[in-house]
Structure formats: C-alpha cells, structure tokens
Image (cartoon, rainbow, N blue to C red):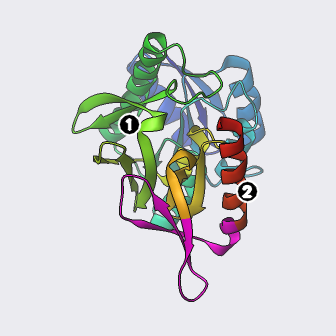
Amino acid sequence: MKTILIIEDDFIIRDNLRELLELKGYKVYLTAGGNEGINVAREVKPHLIICDIIMHGLNGYEVKQKLEQDNETKSIPFVFLTAKADVKDIRFGMDSGADDYITKPYKANELLNTIENRIKRINELKNFKDNFPAVGKEFKPGEERIIISEKNKQQVIKYDEIVFISAAGDYTYIYLTNGKKILVRKLLGQWEKNLPLNIFFRVHKSTMVNLNYVERIEKLEKKTSVAKMKYYDEQIIISQRNLKKLKSNLSSYHSQNN
C-alpha cells in the first residue's frame, strides 16, 4: 500500500484530502504543521508528501528545504498544495525542488491524477535503478544514465552524451553529442540538483554545460564571455560571477582526467 503524508494546517482541507485518498486505497498520514510534518516524514518515509505553502510556523518552502537536508527524506516526491497560483510563486516552488504543485481549490480528479503520475514515476525510477545498478554510485564518465520521457516514450541517456542543457520557461532543452535536441518538462534548477556537479556547471541562470565539452572560453565586447561547445555552433553566455569559477572547475576537471 502506498503511503502519503499530508502537511496542512486547515482541518477541513486536511480531512477532505484524507477521505479522498483513503477511498483510492492510499494509507494517509495527517499533520497540522511543518515541524510535525518533518518528524512524521523522517519516521514513516512516505511514498509522497503533499504540503501546503502558507502555514503557521514553518511554511512549505522551509519544510521542503529541511527535508532536502536529510539523506533519508530528500528523495521523497514532494507536491505543493497552494492557493498561490501566480507563475512566479509556482516557479519558485519548483526551483525549491518540488516535483509538482496543486492549486486550491483543487478538483478531485486533477489531484488524483497528479498523485498517480508521481507514484508511477516512483515505480519507473525503481525499475530503472534495478536495470542500471550504476545509478546512485559516484559518477564515472560513461557509466551513469538518466531516463527521459519524450512524446510518451522513454529513452536512456548517458551523462556523457549531454553537451549542455538550456532553460526554456518551465521546460529545458537537452543537447546531445549526436546533435539531437530533446525538450523535457523540467526546470534547470532541478537538473542542477540531480546531475553530478563535478561534471556539469551552471554557467548562466539559463544554461548548464558539461565540462568535458567546453572547447574554449572567448571574451566578446562589453565584458561578455562565452563558452564554445564541442558539436555545436552556439556561443553559451557565461555570467560574470561564474566566469572565474568555471575556469577553475575546467582546470581541475581536466587535470583529474588527463
């Protein structure tokens, strides 16, 4: 039986969620605030957490942040329940590491679909890890892989097949060594949390690059620097604050791999 933890300080909403989810066969844990929710999450390790954003005491963002700091709870799928439907708020929530969000007032079928999709992803990830035992180990070029869903089809991509990743609103483009570009519904901030940072570096708020494929760094006019990537003609803009660190990371990466 799949377990769901609800962190919500509104009794009526909390109880309605419990009734709806129990009718669908889920085992439900209810908590009325952030600190209580964190304690229960650490104790029962639910399959999924639904958390309100605006609560007394810790808010939803703070709850997510604290769970991210615990190795035993950081990978639990996390869905925000919120009346804050502004795009900036939603994007902030997704950048905080949430897997999805549900806006109040919610429709029962939409909420259940969101939960079922997340539970399905859990099973897919488990199957993926069973088939590719290397996932979860220390990164080695050519060993680690990710699973990508594109047009309802799934494919496996090695880390060293990714040249760079570029933000496109609520989506990102993955540029591969074979010249193919894949659009996926995932924010750049989420990639940054999932990819090995000794290989991938965020050169700009909109782009992450694979250090292995940075051919050179060029300085343009008006103090603008760009990275020239192998396999592509695009010039990747490097923010001034990241330029020095990128050069240092490149030097360290190449010295370790030569």
Q: Which quarter of the picture shows residue 150?
A: top left
Answer yes or no: is residue 103 visible: no
Measuring from the top left, give residue 131's x and y in whole percent.
43, 11
Residue in the picture at 73% in, 56% down: 248
Measuring from the top left, give residue 226's x and y in whole percent.
52, 70
Please, what is the three-letter code of the amino acid marked with disc 2? Ser
Q: CA distance from mark 2 to mark 1?
A: 42 Å
Depth check, front residue: 173 or 221: 221
Q: Residue furthest front?
A: 258
Q: Where does the C terminus fall, quadrant-wise? A: top right
The residue beneath circle 1 is: 114
Q: Secondary structure at mark 2?
A: helix
Please, what is the three-letter code of the amino acid marked with disc 1? Thr
157 w.r.t. 34: above or below: above
Range shown magenta: 217-243
249 w.r.t. 75: above or below: below
Depth check, front residue: 145 or 73: 145
Question: In front: mark 2 or mark 1?
Answer: 2
Residue in the picture at 66% in, 42% down: 198
For residue 216: magenta?
Answer: no
199 w.r.t. 155: above or below: below
The residue beneath circle 2 is: 248
Which one is earlier in the sequence, the residue at label 2 or at label 1? 1
Measuring from the top left, give residue 55's x and y in whole percent.
68, 51
